[in-house]
């Protein structure tokens, strides 16, 4: 793994082979996104951050897309195939070949996107032969219930197999578990499927461990750590919880938000102190914003780097590849894509700036359009330092406007405009005296 193993000799097995039928989607469950990243990506990131020495992903035979995505996030991850989805215990069996030689195996689910690295470290560090991650949600819903005896777990009962008395237990199974490798090898073959779902349940390891004289332990997580997403409703709930977590992190780091609940962030949003995000700002993946920048209401940003003390919006749309220098101004109804704007440049109203390189202190007037696409290829617009682009201009790329040049309003220009010159392509003006009067008279008479 790319990070130093702080949980040495520990493998983490991520289960993702389930059919995810409750999502009602053609997309595998673990590839559904939370805060701009697939759930599996969150789980892999937490595993790497926890410093696990080996990562293993269990997928179904037809889930090459899940495997391929995991390899992007963690190139060293090993992939094991669970031929038939016979339950979480059976899925771990499929991963045993990848766990040879480790002392401990932590098992987590690919559908728990809010899992924190700290919880994984606690599980890895537990002394117990089988250590369960428990939590006490407000609504225990259909989670498995953890039965305790003398302060240690003695059995986990799935909701579907539980009687009313067991369902009344508030301690639930968060799904993750850490097992000493030798104990896992010994107990996995003993799992039976004589239960309501006809599956080999991983949680059955708990009572099998107790029956064989092995020790059990419990790590307590909070409701977010263990939040399992099984449906669209669950996905929406996890998004809300993740956004709450991300917003709190931003506020702590000195980012101002008047109404945090309306601001949407991504897993990798990187914002410096004294940035203000007004209400209804949506920030997609790959956004960095420098100190003191103001992003006004209803702006949408994705894949952009913004310098310090810039002012963006309201109603700005900054698309991937946008790089803005310090003190740039982007106003209302402006769209940028793959565009670099130097220090102090301004595009304040109703413009499209795509595939463009603008120097410093360039002023782009209202309604300017870079005509970057000819139906086959994208072409570049270059504008030199201090150039002034008059309103309602069309920059037909490839086009280069020299430094300090002026473009008359309403100009449609291609090719090279020399530095410090004026380019105007406006048609010559013609005044026809009295025309309007006679036009009106003719039409009124005809009425
Ligand atoms: C599971 C636990 C339950 C716990 C809950 C916490 C079991 C039997 N039940 O229930 O006690 O309260 O999680 O969220 O473990 N998977 C496979 N192969 C399979 C079946 C599942 O890889 O054959 C994977 C799924 O892709 C998923 C994970 O295992 O990532 C959990 O499966 P899921 O069906 O979501 O289990 P729950 O019903 O949520
Ligand atoms: Mg689940």
Image (cartoon, helix red, strand yellow):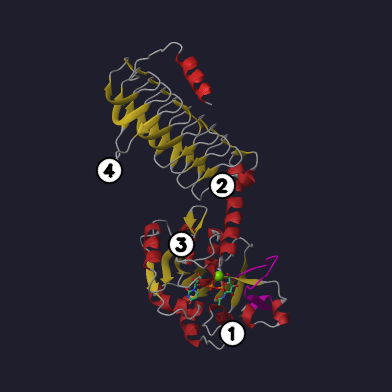
Q: Residue 232 placed where, x, y %?
A: 56, 63
Give the label, 4 or 1, closer to the camera: 4
Distance of label 2 from label 3 (alpha carbons):
20 Å
Marks 4 and 1, the one that precedes in the sequence: 1
Give the label, 4 or 2, closer to the camera: 4
Is 257 above or below relative to 422?
below
Residue receiving disc 4: 376
Which residues are drawn in magenta?
A: 133-154
Badge 4: few (under 14), some or many (20 or more) residues near its Cα, within 10 Å? few
Q: Residue 419 placed where, x, y %?
A: 30, 17
Marks 2 and 3, the one that precedes in the sequence: 3
Residue receiving disc 3: 31
Q: Would you say residue 147 sits in the magenta stretch?
A: yes
For numbered disc 3, what is the local secondary structure?
Answer: helix
> Could you tell whether 354 is left or right of 148 in the image?
left
Residue receiving disc 2: 264
Which numbered circle lies on residue 196?
Answer: 1
Q: Would you say residue 391 sits in the magenta stretch?
A: no
């Amino acid at each position: 793994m790319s990070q130093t193993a702080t949980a040495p000799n520990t493998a983490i097995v991520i289960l993702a082979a389930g059919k995810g039928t409750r999502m009602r989607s053609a997309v595998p469950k673990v590839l559904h996104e939370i805060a701009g990243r697939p759930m599996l990506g969150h789980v892999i990131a937490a595993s790497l951050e926890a410093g696990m020495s080996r990562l293993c992903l269990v997928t179904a035979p037809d889930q090459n897309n899940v495997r391929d995505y995991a390899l992007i996030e963690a190139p060293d991850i090993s992939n094991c195939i669970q031929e038939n989805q016979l339950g979480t215990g059976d899925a771990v069996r499929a991963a045993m070949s990848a766990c040879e030689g480790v002392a401990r195996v932590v098992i987590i689910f690919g559908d728990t996107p809010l899992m924190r690295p700290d919880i994984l470290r606690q599980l890895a560090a537990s002394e117990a032969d089988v250590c369960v991650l428990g939590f006490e949600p407000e609504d225990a819903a259909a989670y498995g219930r953890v039965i305790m005896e003398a302060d240690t777990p003695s059995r986990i009962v799935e909701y579907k197999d539980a009687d009313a008395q067991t369902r009344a237990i508030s301690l639930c199974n968060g799904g993750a578990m850490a097992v000493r490798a030798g104990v896992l090898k010994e107990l996995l073959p003993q799992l039976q499927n004589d239960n309501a779902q006809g599956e080999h349940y991983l949680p059955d390891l708990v009572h099998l461990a107790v029956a064989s004289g092995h020790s059990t332990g419990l790590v307590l997580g909070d409701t977010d750590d263990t939040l399992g997403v099984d449906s669209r409703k669950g996905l929406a709930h996890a998004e809300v919880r993740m956004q709450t977590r991300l917003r709190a992190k931003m506020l702590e780091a000195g980012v101002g938000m008047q109404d945090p609940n309306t601001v949407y962030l991504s897993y990798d949003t990187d914002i410096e102190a004294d940035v203000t995000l007004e209400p209804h700002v949506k920030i997609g993946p790959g956004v960095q914003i420098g100190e003191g920048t103001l992003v006004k209401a209803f702006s949408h940003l994705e894949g952009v780097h913004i310098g310090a003390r810039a002012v963006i919006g309201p109603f700005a749309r900054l698309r991937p590849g946008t790089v803005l220098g310090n003190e740039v101004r982007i106003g209302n109804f402006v769209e940028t894509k793959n565009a670099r704007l130097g220090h102090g440049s301004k595009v304040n109203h109703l413009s499209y700036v795509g595939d463009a390189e603008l120097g410093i202190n360039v002023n782009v007037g209202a309604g300017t359009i870079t005509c970057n696409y000819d139906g086959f290829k994208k072409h570049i617009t270059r504008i030199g330092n201090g150039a002034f682009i008059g309103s309602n201009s069309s920059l037909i790329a490839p086009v280069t406007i020299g430094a300090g040049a002026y473009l008359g309003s309403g100009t449609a220009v291609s090719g090279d405009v020399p530095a410090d010159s004026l380019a105007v392509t406006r048609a010559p003006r013609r005044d026809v005296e009295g025309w309007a009067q006679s036009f009106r008279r003719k039409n009124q008479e005809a009425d």
